[in-house]
Image (cartoon, rainbow, N blue to C red):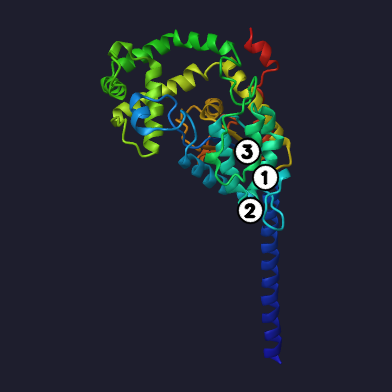
Amino acid sequence: MYCDVLDLVIYFRIFQFLGITMIFYLFIIALDLASALNEKVILYTRHGARSPKTYTEIDSKYLWRTVEQDLTFRGLGQHTNLGSRFRSYVKYDDNEKCIYESLEIQASTTQRVVMSTIGFIKGLCPLNYQEILNRFFIEYYQQYSLDPIKFQAILESDFSDPLSLDLHIFDRDNDFMFHGHKKANCPLMKTIQKSQEKSTYYKNFWTQTQNSPAFDEVVRIIQEANPSKTIAKKDVAFSDLEDLQDDYYANSFHGYKFPAPSSDAISLIESVTKTSRYYVDNSQQDEHYAQLTEPFKWTISQLKSTGTFSWYSGHDSNQVAILSVLVDEQYIVPFASALQLLVDGNIVNVVYNDEILKTKICSEGINCTVDQTIEFLSQYISSDLNKLCNQ
């Protein structure tokens, strides 16, 4: 009798433990589901790898056969891989096909971004990317098409070979969403940038650059890259070092061994690029207004939306503009760079190429609230861009 009672007590304790454990696990699962339901990403990407911005004589004679700044096969692959990383944020139907209505996409109209967008969608929606792209081109890109015949040819393709498509047919007037920094869109930028280049800081920086031991190596590389030209050291300009940095980055990414600057020379040309991008182009409030008003208005709308996937497919200049107000660190933005606002319930964190950034959005730098994020972004939104840019 005693054993029977003891057995009953033991069984009771076991079932009690299992019951509590089950309730605990159900609670954890419920929390996970709630988190998943509230989690969203607002993603800004740079296009994939491209040819150099400006060809040197060596580039055009021996290395490249494509149009300058065009996306390459490697760049396309980068974005296909990148797209596959964000599938968890997209809604799929029972056949594991992307639901078009769950996608919010803003994309630049340059060839390198249009093709990157195609690659990304192929990675994001592998089972129905043709359907998604066909609809996106009709609903988004058609309004920017300059050639109806070539646009129809794009629609009639199955997007399986994007490199065969002519994507140089799109243009967006007054494009403050992606090109607010361009003088054609905002004439004020020319005035500000000229003022920056006349500043004591800029002049001292350029003097220090010219006196650097690595400057002689940089001049020699520029001369070797353009053998038919006579280029004196005194004639090498600030922009020449920017072009060399771009040329080195694009060429080395594609396996070309020229140019091959030393580590000191790389540091020098990168410092010039950073000074141009962050000081000349993105250090004044009016520059922030021109470059960030439209992107941040869109971002705020996405923070308020119920969607889980919002994607801004753009350029390195867009990420530099955003980073310039978020953090003090100055980054050289790589091809296929991903800058994310990760939203979990009411909490926002910023992730740049898998690194969580401590930003200026809130005093803690991380785990800022949605309201704090909206308040921070709002200070870089102009109420009248046209008036600002044409003053």
Q: Secondary structure at mark 1?
A: helix
Most extreme residue toward the front is: 149
**Dot 1 alpha-carbon crowd within 10 angstroms: few under 14, some 14 to 19, many 20 or more:** many
Please state which amino acid type lies under the numbered disc 1: Ile
- Quarter of the view holding residue 308: top right
Visible in this render: residue 350?
Answer: no
Looking at the picture, which amino acid does disc 3 mark?
Ile
* Badge 3 element: helix
Foreground mark, 3 or 1, reads: 3
Name the residue tied to disc 3. Answer: 154
Give residue 95's position: percent from left, percent from top.
69, 58
Question: In this picture, is 385 found above or below 39?
Answer: above
Mark positioned earlier in the residue sequence (3 or 1): 1
Task: Give me the disc on residue 132.
Answer: 1
User: Which image quarter: residue 301?
Assistant: top right
Say what secondary structure mark 2 lies in: loop
Q: Nearer the viewer, residue 22 or 200?
A: 200
Alpha-carbon span between mark 3 and mark 1: 13 Å
Q: Tell me: residue 192, above or below residue 248.
A: above
**Res 199 label:** none
Residue at point 65%, 21% (across, down) = 173
Whether residue 67 is situated above or below residue 25 in the rendered picture: above
Where residue 127 is drawn, which disc sits there? 2
The quadrant of the image that shows the C terminus is top right
> For the residue marked with disc 2, what is the amino acid?
Leu
Residue 56 lies, in percent from the top left, at 36, 24
